[in-house]
Amino acid sequence: MTVATPSKCFALRPYQKEALRAIHAGFREFDRQLAVLPTGAGKTRIFCQVAADFRPKRTLILAHREELISQAVDKLHSSTGIAAEVERGKEWASLEAPVVVGSVQTLMQERRRDRWPWDHFSLVVVDESHHILSDSYQGILGHFGDRAKVLGVTATPDRGDKRNLGRYFQNIACEVSLLDLIRDGWLAPIRVKTVPLGIPLDGVRSTAGDYNAEDLGLAIDPWLERIADVLAAHRERKTLVFLPLVAVSERFAALCRQRGLPAEHIDGQSRDRREILDRFRRGHTRFLCNAMLLTEGYDEPSIDCVVCLRPTKVRSLYSQIIGRGTRIHPGKDHLLVLDFLWQSEEHSLIRPAHLIASDEEEASRLTAALGMDGDLEKAEREVKADRTSKLAERLRENRHRAPRILDPLELAVSLNDARLADYVPVMEWQGEPASPRQLEALCKLGIDTRAVGCKGHASLLLDRLFTRRRLKLATPRQVSFLKRLGHRDAETLRFDEASALLEAHFAKRAAPAA
């Protein structure tokens, strides 16, 4: 099958263009790819452009919620001019449609999907693809996905989630981190204020891998007045509140109004739903309470405070909740997350640190660094510095290498990136032995290949080295030498700047003593 090539996309942000190029390049080798982008990064815009680039071949976009279906149709038309047709309930798409946006609940029915030839679509896009291993998705992909390319898009999962998704996907085409987008100004910085109420979760059962909503409603109800008092201290914020049940959300909105807060409740049965959202958008309402209605497909960039009163064990759900407030907006300098402490014997309760942590151990370190009132980016820098310090200690204990050759451990210390030394494969191919071509390329770049663990590790090292070369940054060897001379941020220097510093150093050493 001929794979489409990316068209010019001047409306895309730089990282979105890079993601698009990576997806198309990956499809030359892999049939099933995953794109990992945090909430607010514009994943809908990216997969709509991929669908446009696949024309004249047809695309199926799968989504499991009304808001996501409408969002895909609207974004596809506004960004590419393609008029998609919808396959959902009483809506039937024509066989001639260039792009079909299909409801998972509809297409899981054999009578609806079997009217489409198995080779009808050349590309299947799966929105919110962390659901892809369920029987409903697999039934649809079993019909369409054998010949089609499959692109899954999801918010940043942790390492364990990615391993699970690796049972279906062959490759992670692109992965954009939440902190990268915050640092580059595309998403709002996140500050976490811990509220130590210690709401007990004893007796709350688990249903389908997460806390039971009915039990949560009973557990949180006695605490609602105290929580409303906390929100009253942040009345200047535009706040989105997530609660476990409609009745609890209604009661909490009423308690907020009793304290003079302009608050409303919204749910799927609200007749004036559009008017409620419009009042919140315009700022007439400052506190909007919902029972998990607005987790996906809802965009209101002016939100600058998110309150999660629906504790969860599911990282993707928590990411969606907090992601409602990460978009940038004029006059908004950060997102405030009010993190209410819960008393639970389980260690799987998701906290703000899990938004950026790769595993549970790192989440614990980040939570400690955040303290009671912290900045997520600052906490990450502290944890990263600590990891680099420990890597440097390992390096001092292991100096048995050939001169002028860097091993991945020294490279990790030099570039302040622990992943280069402590790489863990996720996809199946990443765990395979590094290829001779990869090892040869690393040797030419001055890397000791004896410590390169697998193909994925080699790929990460090469990607980092070639990216630095393309950006004309200092070479790892220059960085390593300059750091030994006391330059703390040598990894950020350009190649010519590093060269000038080293020339000056050696010239000074060579100069005769006065």
Image (cartoon, rainbow, N blue to C red):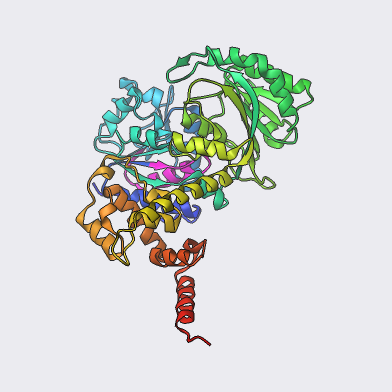
- The part of the image, by quadrant, that contains residue 194 is top right
Task: Name which residue lies at 47% across and 26% down.
Answer: 348
Judge whether residue 472 can be spotted in this image.
no
Judge whether residue 171 can be spotted in this image.
yes
- Give the left or right position of residue 208, taking residue 114 as reference: right
| Frontmost residue, 296 versus 273 | 296
- Percent position of residue 377, x then y: 56, 46
- Percent position of residue 304, x then y: 65, 38
- Give the left or right position of residue 406, taking residue 244 as reference: left
Task: Note whether 161 is above or below 108 in the view shown.
Answer: below
Q: Residue furthest front?
A: 514
| Frontmost residue, 492 versus 143 | 492
- The part of the image, by quadrant, that contains residue 463 is bottom left
How many numbered marks, from 0 up? 0
Task: Note whether 257 is above or below 141 in the view shown.
Answer: above
- Percent position of residue 216, x then y: 56, 16
Task: Note whether 41 is above or below 348 in the view shown.
Answer: below
Q: Residue furthest left?
A: 436
Task: Name which residue lies at 34% across and 61% down.
Answer: 406
Q: Residue furthest right?
A: 260
Task: Name which residue lies at 55% across and 36% down.
Answer: 367
- Give the left or right position of residue 176, taking residue 307 as reference: left
- Percent position of residue 319, x then y: 51, 34
Residue range in magenta is: 35-61
Task: Note whether 144 is above or below 188 in the view shown.
Answer: above
| Frontmost residue, 9 versus 40 | 40
Is 467 within the magenta?
no
